[in-house]
Amino acid sequence: MELTQEQIQELRNLKNLPDSDDIRYKEIIKKALIDNDLIIYLLNNKELEEQEADPSDYLGQNIYPFFLVHPT
């Protein structure tokens, strides 16, 4: 069987896919958050706004890849 260039590219793309559905869902959510200008605005991080930071700079500052539980 001879593969087309399109099929070869599709196989190459599979190499970069995460193994877990959870990881894929987190990536979708992360992308949705950093691509939404209203969300970035509502985060109201003056320091990053003054630096004219890229939305991806909000990761780890205001958008965390884990849950934060407030200590009580």
Image (cartoon, rainbow, N blue to C red):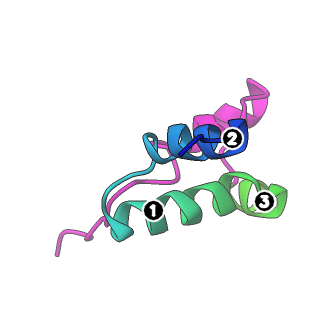
For the point 63% across and 55% down, the residue is 31
Could you say which quadrant of the image residue 58 lies in?
top right
17 or 26, which lies in front? 17
Over which residues does the magenta segment extend? 44-72
For the point 37% across and 70% down, the residue is 21
Under mark 2, the amino acid is Thr
x and y, in percent, of residue 45 in the image: 65, 45
32 or 63, which lies in front? 32
- Check the image and name the residue furthest to the bottom: 72
Give the label on residue 24, or none: 1
47 or 54, which lies in front? 54
Q: Which image quadrant: the C terminus?
A: bottom left
Give the label on residue 61, or none: none
x and y, in percent, of residue 53 in the image: 72, 29
Under mark 1, the amino acid is Arg
The verdict on residue 63 being magenta is: yes
Residue wearing tag 3: 36
Q: Secondary structure at mark 3?
A: loop
Which badge, 3 or 2, is on the more N-terminal residue?
A: 2
The overriding secondary structure of the stretch rendered in magenta is: loop
For the point 49% across and 43% down, the residue is 61
Could you say which quadrant of the image residue 55 lies in?
top right
x and y, in percent, of residue 6 in the image: 71, 43
Which badge, 2 or 1, is on the more N-terminal residue?
A: 2
x and y, in percent, of residue 29 in the image: 56, 66
